[in-house]
Image: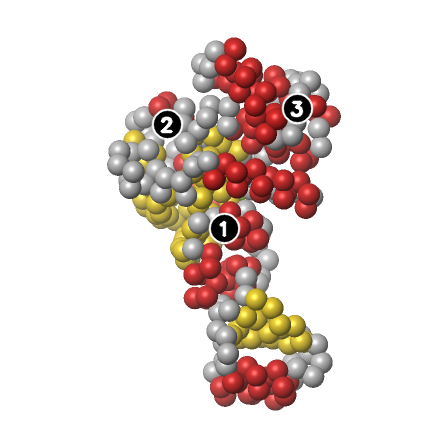
Amino acid sequence: MSLQAPILEVDGLRKVFRGRTAVDGVSFRVAAGECFGLLGPNGAGKTTTIRMLYGFSPPTAGTVRLFGMDLGRDWRRIRARIGVCQQDNTLDPDLSVEENLLVFAGYFAIGRREAAARAAELLEFFALTPRARSRVMDLSGGMIRRLILARALVNRPDLLILDEPTTGLDPQSRHQVWDRLEKLKASGLSAILTTHYMEEAARLCDRLVIVDRGRILVEGRPGELIRKHVGRQVVEIGGPDGALREYLKEQGLPHDDLGERILLYTAGDDGRVAAVREHFCLRRCTFRDATLEDVFLRLTGRELRE
Ligand SMILES: Nc1ncnc2c1ncn2[C@@H]1O[C@H](COP(=O)(O)OP(=O)(O)OP(=O)(O)O)[C@@H](O)[C@H]1O
Ligand SMILES: [Mg+2]
């Protein structure tokens, strides 16, 4: 396999559950060393996609190739080269922190001495060494997440598959996980991750897709997507009046009208935006940089899912 060949190739992936389509023809590539994001509202089909990538769930249609091998045919060889963090806690509650790593290493036929060395190294890396003998049940949510990550690395994978690695964590724990993931990325590890935290995606992902109802809406680098679908800056105008609405329409300025609030998207210096600032920002107005969250909401809408 040449260096340029993608590490992961997904083509026309579909999953239908009892007549209901959860993943509806998804295709993308991940290059070696890349961190690739899968974003989308609840029920968009992220976990279903991820599960098909590591052979947990058979696709209804489509193909998955990892490291140049077919997932259906070469599952065993592929399995040895990936690390998986599922959305749910899949640790063994009856085992200690360290035992969870050692038992998992056993599945990959890693010798006991080598497994102990790797476990020690990973516990250190995830700041879990003082809790090595604790029962999983006694750990905090942040420690559990870190242990799940440590376990996914026991077989020294080439690709890490992460389904919402920081959901439910406090800001301290989340930042700690980001910091570790950035270190792993710097060491050359490839990753594919799902997240609901746009800040996480913008920080960690080189490229990402936004999916909705089982389909990819857009694909690109975070910064590119922001500039293309939102612009550079956003003006949030509280309590908008008819005159403002009229002006925005007249000038054809890109905006979203949320009733109590209008979001005005700007590409940078624009005399018309300056005019809005001057004439219509008499009350509550906020000026801020455009974010990936703006892209997400513009593309997937603001209605609740599920
Ligand atoms: N085993 C299953 N049987 C039937 N339907 C399923 C099954 N797993 C998922 N679904 C349905 O498929 C759709 C996609 O679910 P999925 O869990 O992949 O979404 P998600 O993007 O991971 O959402 P979240 O952000 O909430 O984790 C949903 O409508 C869900 O109800
Ligand atoms: Mg999910």
- Mark 2 lies on a secondary structure that is helix
Query: Given this view, does label 3 or label 2 mark the residue nearer the observer?
Result: 3
The N terminus appears in which quarter of the rendering?
A: top left
CA separation in Å, label 1 and label 2? 24 Å
Marks 1 and 2, the one that precedes in the sequence: 1
Q: Which residue is mark 1?
A: 39
- Mark 1 lies on a secondary structure that is strand
Marks 3 and 1, the one that precedes in the sequence: 1
Which amino acid is tagged 3? Thr
Q: Could you tell me if residue 17 is visible in this image? A: no
Q: Could you tell me if residue 181 is visible in this image? A: yes
Furthest residue toward top: 112
Number of marks in picture: 3
Which amino acid is tagged 1? Leu
Q: State the residue at coordinates (55%, 59%).
A: 293
Image-quadrant location for residue 63: top left
Specify whether tag 1 is near ligand 1 (CB below 8 Å): no
Side of 51 relative to 275 (left or right): left
Which amino acid is tagged 2? Ile
Specify whether tag 3 is near ligand 2 (CB below 8 Å): no
- Mark number displayed over residue 129: 3
Furthest residue toward right: 138
| Label 1 Cα crowd, 10 Å radius (few <14 / some 14-19 / many 20+) | many
CA separation in Å, label 3 and label 1? 33 Å
Q: Position of residue 182 (x, y in %)?
A: 52, 41
Q: Which residue is mark 2?
A: 78
In the displayed structure, would residue 151 be above or below residue 99?
Answer: below
- Mark number displayed over residue 197: none
